[in-house]
Image: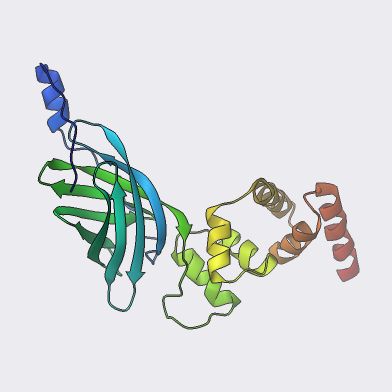
Amino acid sequence: KLQFLYLIGHQSASARRARNRRPAMQELNYDAKHFSSGTYTGTITTPEKLQLPLLATLHFDAEQGTITGDIEDHHAGKLDISGTFNKSAPYDFKIVKADTTYNGFRQNLNLIGRYKSPAGKGVFQLQPERIIAQASSGKPLGQEETIQELIGMGFSEEASRQAVVVKGLAMSEAAEYLLNPDETTAASEVLIERFKGMGFPLDKIEAAVAKCDGKEDVALQALLAETEEGA
């Protein structure tokens, strides 16, 4: 169970009022369609505004609408959890760990909400560290279906196409690639945007950028050459 450090000593009236104010929830975005199984890291904020680390391994069963796994906090260590989630808007969930209850929502790939324990109430937030991607249908997916699944998880269409079509990654590998972009990926995205502004077709841009090893002049020459061939 969660145990909290309580401030000892005199508190001013303003400090007590600040402690009792409920933290504002973020505006929710319902564009993403799926909860994502995997490992999460984040923080839990105590009634005294102390932020403590929070770790979780969560598995979302799309067929049953259930959550299993474990959550580890600063004081109680790792404990098993159980819960349920809503597969449609407002995409809310409830997780129970021993005598602590977490109620929240999915904000794109993140999980945010409030918790309640015998020691008090507060807020929590979790960000995915590693996604274990699973198709919501449970069936093998083609490229377009994989792209749509990734978009449903909250990734942009352009980044999803880059991972699946250009990189040739399957569902799980594509999700991890998009979750942890490297410097090369960032540079490629800059080139893609630049060439799009020049009026080149997106599919030709992606193919050229994938082969240019980050060299803008090489990619531009390839695009120009292909444009002349098609003229």
Where is the C terminus found, in terms of image quarters? bottom right
Q: Is residue 65 left or right of residue 220?
A: left
Q: Is residue 98 visible?
A: yes
Number of labels in the image equals: 0
* Residue at 47 percent of width and 83 percent of height: 139
* Residue at 15 percent of width and 42 percent of height: 121
Examine the image and state in which quarter residue 153 appears.
bottom left
> How is colour applied across the structure in the image?
rainbow
Image height of 125 relative to 138, above or below: above
Q: Is residue 60 left or right of residue 189?
A: left
Counting from the top left corner in percent of width and height, residue 20 is at 12, 32
* Residue at 15 percent of width and 29 percent of height: 6
Examine the image and state in which quarter residue 168 appears.
bottom right
Counting from the top left corner in percent of width and height, residue 23 is at 22, 37
- Which of the pair 86/119 is nearer the observer? 119
Image height of 137 relative to 60, above or below: below
Counting from the top left corner in percent of width and height, residue 69 is at 31, 63
* Residue at 19 percent of width and 32 percent of height: 5
Examine the image and state in which quarter residue 62 appears.
bottom left
Q: Is residue 29 visible?
A: no
Counting from the top left corner in percent of width and height, residue 215 is at 81, 48
Image height of 179 relative to 46, above or below: below
